Amino acid sequence: MRFFRFILSISALIAAATAQTARWEQSEGGLGTNLALVFENCEPDGQPALPSIPGVAFAFSGRSESVNIVNFQMTRSVTLGYAVRSQGNQPLRIPAFTVRTNKGDVRVEAFDAARPAVAIDTLANSRLAPERRSVWAGEVLGLTYELSAARRTNPQISPSFDWNPAPLVAEDWSKPEVTERNAGGERRVNVIFRTRAVARVANTLKLEAATHLISVQTGTIGFGIISQPRMEQVSVTSDQPTVEVKPLPPGAPAGFGGAVGQFKLTSKVVPEKAAVGEPVTWTLELTGTGNWPDLTGLPARSVSNDFKVVQPKARRTPAEGKLFDATLTEDVVLVPSKPGTYTLGPVTLAYFDPQSGTYRTVTTPKTSLVITTPAAPQFNVMPNPSAGADESAQAAPTEKTPPKPVAAAAAPAGIPRDPLPSGPNAQAPFTLRGLALATATPFALTVLFWFWLALRRARETDPARPQREARVRLAATLREIDLAAADRKAGLLVAWQRDTAILWGLAKAAPSADAIDSTEWSDLWREADRAIYGKQGGLPADWGSRAQEALARKKTPPFRFHRLFLPRNLMPFAAAVTLVLGASLTLRAASADAGVSYRKGDFPAAESTWREALRKAPLDWSTRHNLSLALEQLDRPAEAAAHAAVAFVQNPAQPAVRWHFTRTAEKLGAAASPLAGFITPGVVRTLARDASPADWQFRLVGAAWLLAAAIAILLLRAYRGAHRAWKWVSASIGVAALVLAALSVNGILAYGAAAHPESAIVARATTLRSIPTEADTAQKTTPLAAGGLALIDRSFLGWHRLAFEGGQTGWVRKEDVVPVWK
């Protein structure tokens, strides 16, 4: 035992006397080169400060410790792992440096990697390609962003990337165009995005670099059938091309407003011949490609003082998804006050054409406008109070003369219509087995699709998802911090703090270091604050490695597959069903509340509730009927009759609606001419009121299908020689179809203009005006009685233009009419 103790003592003295060393060792795998810094018989005092090498970044990957005893000699080792990332293919050489340990300073000798580090550029690279390197100020410039990645790395490329277009004004990037090609004997995936931009100020611009975060495969995890690819995120930064923006040349023509591009200006006057008092519309339309964000309007126009001008704002309509292709339209309404021949135009627009490098002008042709004296007054004019007894004497015999009847213009006779184009061939029927498989397949695919949607929803609603995503972003941010220049580190540190707050679940808008439940992370946060906001900003040399080590130790909960079967993920349609039921219950509740208000005698509240419900559902005939009841209670018979008539047209089969329509029409003493016959209906209108005009139209379509089926049966019998009974079946179907068609046509015609989608009923006595304004007292007007039926053929700034059966037209306020179907 004494000898054994002696041997152990000698071994301990030898181990203690062994010199402390530190050296580099290399291992292969992953993206680039993996190195290990091995300390023997000592350990580093904190995170070592590695030498700075241009284009090379060291990412800390972990720490391990071991003890070896060989020939009674014990060696303690501490190993720090680093993943090396380089931006070039040059050989990797690490110079010698000194590191502080618990046994004093230890020198690490220079190290040459056995293989060059894998450059990110060899795996993925990107570039910005302007269409031209020299453009004019305001010229539309095409810009292409191209990302190329090695196919062997199985790249996963995000459809979005970061790029700041300032000082350019740019459109959104197009959808990615994915292609594959061979480059240097290697298969590569190319993704191209396109956009267009405009530089407003002359200068030499250096475009901002685009940053794209992609995932590449660096190996596999596991073995055999349970292996899976190991993916690493890589930040790819594009180049920064320069574009020279030239100022526009001198000598701009008069009236030049800064338009740059290719433009077309058109002018249209409708009508070119009109009578005094009739409105004339002069339309200017500018189209083309150019710097539309800098264009303020169309050139000014000049007209004679014999016209009164109503000028609305210009309408700009950009092309879908485009910023530099648009149409600018401006309508000017001219109301002539004197007869004569006038000239409108020309109108000239000056612009700069970047393709030719010269100023150009586009001019609209002159348009001659002929204004005539009206042959007869089209509107009733108030009598002149200064007229004497002569006019009264002349009016007396006129009153005794009966008015001449005016017959309606005959409708054109029917003529054959155009032939139909050829359609697709008919499909062959399925066999019984094929029909069963075809019927069952969509349900099986629906189940699989359902589970796939549920899995996506489970991943999206996973409460730990933001923390996992933040952890991935933190790893990429730390790698960028190691490579970034000093002026870019502040922005990267702000991004690091934002993702750190998400990783630790800090809900505050501006959390402090004390809010983090970790001393290590709190110290990192304070040092980042000093680097961002301090007067002498700067990170400690070992900050990046300590942050990498802290991130490696911080774990986030993984995704749990059982979340797939949670009700909110497996049945997402339950929310939609709830929404529909909620909306239905809301409408029913609103209707119920209005009914309670009506029964309590609060008719204004009932009217307001029912009117708001009709604004959302104008085809709800029961709500419109109820609104008519409330309006009658409020002594507004004209409006009540209008809404009752609309409810009757929408659902004439309802007895209560029929009775109320008849009552309000008799109380008002008037009704629309097509609907007046339903008050005391004959045989024709008794049949017609069985359904609404829309229902009769559907029945007419059904009659057409029945008649086609009868003809098809006759053809089948003629070609196949079927049994004679089919002849009688075909005849029966054909007769039924013709009867149904006759009833349907009768039902549609019985409603007259009320069957038109643009029909409306005048809800109150008002004034029919020749132009849509109340400011012009000199325009011609005529009284318009309530209850009339007309078509809305135009709308303008709160006005409707009504067209009546006799051809009369005029403008009224929107509040004065009740649309039948809208």
Image (cartoon, rainbow, N blue to C red):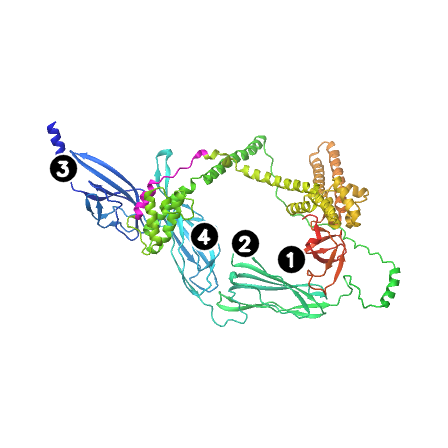
Marks 4 and 1, the one that precedes in the sequence: 4
Q: Is residue 69 left or right of residue 27?
A: left
- If you read the primary sequence from the N terminus, does the residue marked by circle 3 or circle 1 appear first? 3
Q: Residues within 10 Å of mark 3 (few under 14, many from 20)?
A: some
As shown in the figure, which amino acid type bears the numbered disc 4? Phe
Q: Residue at x 51, y 69 (%)?
A: 359
Residue extent of the magenta highlight: 543-562
Residue that mark 2 sits on: 320
Q: Magenta region's main secondary structure?
A: helix
| The one of 795 and 768 positioned closer to us in this rendering | 768
Left or right: 362 in relation to 116: right
Foreground: 623 or 161? 623
Q: Is residue 275 above or below residue 740?
A: below
Amino acid, disc 1: Leu
From the viewer's perspective, is the residue at label 2 or at label 3 nearer?
3
**Labels 1 and 2: the sequence-earlier one:** 2
The secondary element bearing badge 1 is classed as: loop
Q: Could you tell me which residue is drawn at 68 percent across and 61 percent down?
A: 773
Q: Position of residue 70 (x, y in %)?
A: 17, 34
Disc 3 to disc 1: CB gap under 8 Å: no
Instruction: Check contact, mark 4 vs mark 1: CB within 8 A.
Output: no
| Label 4 sits on residue | 193
Report the residue marked by disc 3: 14
Q: Position of residue 637 (x, y in %)?
A: 75, 49
Residue at which label 1 appears: 797
Kind of residue at badge 3: Ile
